[in-house]
Image: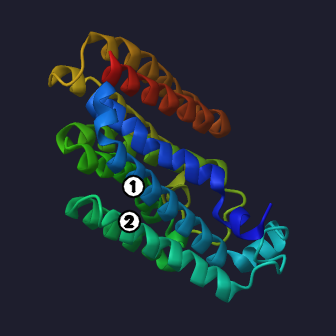
């Protein structure tokens, strides 16, 4: 694979980009076809923003990667750090320029996202919980961005909060899982201990569960969504318990619950 292509992690970029289409279906159902241009531009914005963030991540992690991932483009010498920095910055700038052609709100959201990406890489990555909050905020902003494109921010804000809460819970569980190897980060489990960090993770999982009926209660979706999201809620509840015994299984279970949640959102948008 071309080193510049490998640097952006194209599969991750594509997965993030598909979130725009997902939100379009959630908000507009089959009517998403009327927004084909906005959808295309939104997909490109998310793709290039993710690509730029991934590139800068490798730039800032280049010294650690010399030991842990020497085959990556920068530590292997296939791309110089200076070129990687220019490449990543250019990708972020490109995403910003494309967002101008959607609407002013999407432009503002992309500006905020880029500021968060840069702040995370420069200072928040090693600060544990604050870094977790930043990453979870970026995940949630995918839904806000989609809401700005398709004109229903009230609905997508509900999903954004659920995404933030569930992702933050999983980030904490991952930090519990990695406690033995985290030597350059001050994580929440290190600060308050595994037990209380685990309780915090469970609370965030359960907040997502508690919010999940809202799209039905507020009249956005019908009963089919409620039935579908129940399965995701059950898996989240299981994850909130099992991670105390097995953090690896807990965070993987939470990932499954998140996928099931996305499927239920799709059902709500289509049916």
Q: Considering only order in the chain, which callout, 2 or 1, is on the residue closer to the N terminus? A: 1
Label 1 secondary element: helix
- Residue at the image point whose x is 69% and y is 85% from the top: 81
The residue that appears at 66% across and 85% down in the rendered structure is: 83
Please indicate whether residue 124 sits to the left or right of residue 85 in the image: left
In the rendered image, which quarter is residue 221 located in?
top left
Mark 2 Cα-neighbour bin, 10 Å: few <14, some 14–19, many ≥20: some
Q: Quadrant of the C terminus?
A: top left
Q: Which residue is outermost to the bottom? A: 82
Residue 163: give x, y in percent of width and height: 39, 42
For residue 169, say whether it is visible: no
Q: Tell me the CA gap for discs 1 and 2.
A: 7 Å
Residue 135 location (% of width, % of height): 46, 58
Q: Quarter-wise, where is residue 1 in the image?
A: bottom right
Picture layout, residue 59 above or below residue 220: below
Q: Is residue 41 visible?
A: yes
- Residue 188 in percent (x, y) is at 49, 58
User: In the depicted view, which residue is nearer to us: 119 or 46?
Assistant: 46
* Numbered badge on residue 41: 1
Q: Residue at x 80, y 67 (%)?
A: 68
- Return the residue nearer the eye: 1 or 73: 1
Q: Is residue 165 left or right of residue 156?
A: right
Do the numbered discs 1 and 2 sit on residues whose CB atoms are within 8 Å?
yes
Between residues 263 and 167, which one lies in front from this camera angle?
263
Rendering coords of residue 263 (x, y %):
45, 25
Residue 245 placement, left or right of 80: left
Q: Is residue 81 above or below residue 244?
A: below
Q: Is residue 62 above or below residue 34?
A: below
Q: Secondary structure at mark 2?
A: helix
Neighbourhood count class around disc 1 (C-alpha, 10 Å): few under 14, some 14–19, many 20 upward: some
Disc number placed over residue 98 in the picture, else none: 2
């Amino acid at each position: 694979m071309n080193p510049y292509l490998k640097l952006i992690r194209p599969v991750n970029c594509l997965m993030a980009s598909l979130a725009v289409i997902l939100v379009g279906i959630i908000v507009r159902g089959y009517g998403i076809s009327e927004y084909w241009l906005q959808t295309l531009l939104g997909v490109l914005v998310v793709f290039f923003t993710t690509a730029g963030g991934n590139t800068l991540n490798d730039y800032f992690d280049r010294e650690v990667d010399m030991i842990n991932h020497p085959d990556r483009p920068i530590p292997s010498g296939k791309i110089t750090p200076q070129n990687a920095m220019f490449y990543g910055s250019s990708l972020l700038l490109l995403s910003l320029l494309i967002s101008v052609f959607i609407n002013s709100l999407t432009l503002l959201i992309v500006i905020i996202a880029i500021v968060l990406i840069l702040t995370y890489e420069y200072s928040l990555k090693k600060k544990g919980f604050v870094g977790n909050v930043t990453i979870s905020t970026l995940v949630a902003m995918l839904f806000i961005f989609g809401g700005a494109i398709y004109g229903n921010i009230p609905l997508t804000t509900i999903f954004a909060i659920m995404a933030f809460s569930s992702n933050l819970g999983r980030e904490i569980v991952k930090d519990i899982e990695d406690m033995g190897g985290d030597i350059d980060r001050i994580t929440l489990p290190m600060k308050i201990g595994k037990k209380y960090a685990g309780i915090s993770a469970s609370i965030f999982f359960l907040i997502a569960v508690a919010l999940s009926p809202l799209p039905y209660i507020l009249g956005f979706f019908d009963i089919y969504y409620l039935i579908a999201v129940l399965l995701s809620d059950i898996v989240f509840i299981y994850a909130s318990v099992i991670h105390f015994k097995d953090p690896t299984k807990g965070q993987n279970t939470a990932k499954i619950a998140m996928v099931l949640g996305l499927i239920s959102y799709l059902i709500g948008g289509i049916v």
